Image (spheres, rainbow, N blue to C red):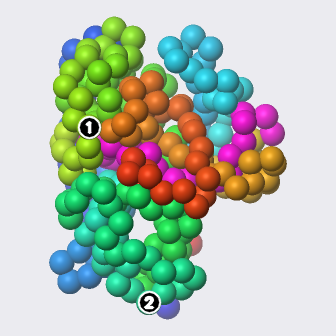
Amino acid sequence: MTQQPQLQEFEFAYIQVDDQANQTRRRLYRSKYFAEVIAETVSLEMVCVPNGIFQMGSPKIEISRDRSEEPQHWVAVSTFFIGKFPITQSQWLAVANLPQVNRVLNPDPSHFKGFDRPVESISWFDAMEFCDRLSHKTGLNYRLPSEAEWEYACRGGTNSPFSFGETISTDLANYDSSYAYGFGPNDKYRQKTTPVGSSQLANPFGLYDMHGLVWEWCCDSWHENYQGAPQNSKVWESFGEYEAYRVIRGGSWFNPPSSCRSASRSKYLADVWLNNVGFRVAVTPMS
């Protein structure tokens, strides 16, 4: 029988910024997490996201919003755990070396190399195989987060365009900073991924890199808008004309800041792999 993971606490810094990305407040928070040991020198930190309700989608006054982000609707979310960071290349390699479940995994798929950089250039099917292998090893049900879980986790209890406030800067996220959001700054465009957690600043739940760095696969199939969306945080499993597409969230190093908003959503074919798409994993607490 699988044992309940041992929870620990960690402290992290969270800042809020104004509409020009100037810091207005800095606070220290604490969150609970557990560390899953994947290999001798590789572990995965899973942060507890508390249950709650939130308004999913964007208001009509939000800059650069898309019609796919409407209508705003209330969603009830159950407690779950999600990766503190996107899956790294060292974590990917460790799991790729585990026994195959459904498909072969390339142990070194990423374009931008670095053990502490996010894995990218992997498809939705590859991410699902990662979850299957990790589940078989640990006895826990690792999975991709639902789209609702992802947005709830990204917002961290906030309702602004970004979890840090009305805009972002390159001190907070890795994105195409040759573009600005609102009154935010233009800055040097990195044009590549960076090690996870490079900003050393988390959102209010203790999660890093939810804005930018790499798009993150969600479990859900794509729907053009939220008409008929679940009112809970379960995966929206019904298929429409976009059956072959899966949701991606968070924007990336390649995208403007508008794509990195908490409400921003897009899609890719499930078998597509690109060097700006990665993922993080989730798991439901055992009862």
Residue, x 56% and y 21% (percent of image)?
Answer: 65
Residue, x 39% and y 74% (percent of image)?
Answer: 106
Q: Residues within 10 Å of mark 1 (few under 14, many from 20)?
A: few
Q: Is residue 36 left or right of residue 72?
A: left
Residue, x 71% and y 26% (percent of image)?
Answer: 71
Taking depth in this image into account, of 268 and 158 the one nearest to the observer is 268
Amino acid residing under circle 2: Pro
Is residue 227 within the magenta segment?
yes
Write down the quadrant of residue 32 in the picture.
bottom left
Q: Identify the element where label 2 is drawn.
A: loop
Residue, x 57% and y 11% (percent of image)?
Answer: 61
Q: Is residue 107 left or right of residue 217?
A: left
Residue 58 shows up from this direction: yes
Magenta stretch, residue numbers: 201-228
Question: Is the C terminus in the top left, top right, bottom left or bottom right quadrant?
Answer: bottom right
Q: Is residue 228 left or right of residue 210?
A: right
**Gap between marks 1 and 2 measured at Cα:** 35 Å
According to the picture, the residue beneath numbered tag 2 turns out to be 99
Q: Residues within 10 Å of mark 2 (few under 14, many from 20)?
A: few
Residue 252 lies, in percent from the top left, at 38, 40
Circle nearer the viewer, 1 or 2: 1
Residue 236 lies, in percent from the top left, at 71, 51
Write down the quadrant of residue 172 in the picture.
top left
Taking depth in this image into account, of 260 and 189 the one nearest to the observer is 189
Q: Identify the element where label 1 is drawn.
A: loop
Is residue 267 within the magenta segment?
no
Taking depth in this image into account, of 268 and 234 the one nearest to the observer is 268
Residue 191, numbered label: 1
Residue 212, numbered label: none
Residue 16 lies, in percent from the top left, at 28, 23
Amino acid residing under circle 1: Gln
In the image, residue 237 above or below residue 254: below
